[in-house]
Amino acid sequence: MDVGVDVVVWRAPGPASSAEAAARYAELRASPLGAFEPAVAAFVRELRQTSPDPSSPVSWDEALTVGIDAVIVHVVWPARRQVLDLVALLAERHGLVCYEPSREVAMS
């Protein structure tokens, strides 16, 4: 059975260090969810136009936790690396920070 991995995407003024990203991840996990920030909304729209794993019944709707200015993507698909690469690519395209807590890696 595949173990899920979280990846977090948010808008930030510049590149985040791993320590800054870890602190922001903890803050997001503890905060209530709300309306979209425009860059995050564009990221989510584009992400939903892709298929995370065509062979899986799990959809993006089941894997996304969307907040005011951030998204937590719970990656549960066997093709995990490809999905993480897609999320990172789209985050970069929309000027968002992407952080993978399990590896403590910030990509922006």
Image: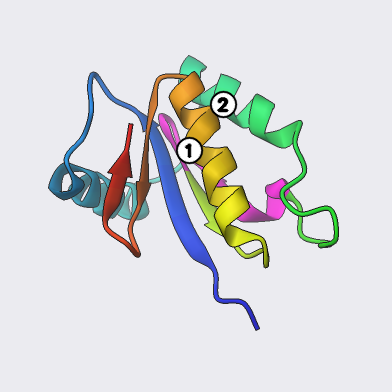
Q: In this view, does 46 lie to the left or right of 29?
A: right
46 is within the stretch colored magenta: no
Q: What stretch is highlighted in magenta?
A: 60-71
Viewer-proximal residue, 95 or 80? 80
Instruction: Classify the position of the C terminus by image quarter.
Output: top left
Residue position for label 1: 88
Q: Which amino acid does label 1 sit on?
A: Ala
Mark 2 secondary-structure assignment: helix
Q: 27 or 55, which lies in front?
A: 55
Of residues 30 and 60, the one nearer the viewer is 60
The residue shown at (35%, 54%) is 29
Q: Position of residue 87 (x, y in %)?
A: 54, 40
Q: Please tell me the numbered disc located at residue 43.
A: 2
Q: Quadrant of residue 62?
A: bottom right
- Residue 2: give its label: none
Q: Quadrant of residue 106?
A: top left
- Residue at left 42%, top 38%? 9
Q: Determine the residue positioned at 85% across, 60% down.
A: 55
Rendered location of residue 76, percent (x, y)? 62, 65
Q: Distance between the residues labelled 2 and 1?
A: 11 Å
Labels 2, 1: front one: 1
The quarter of the picture where the N terminus appears is bottom right
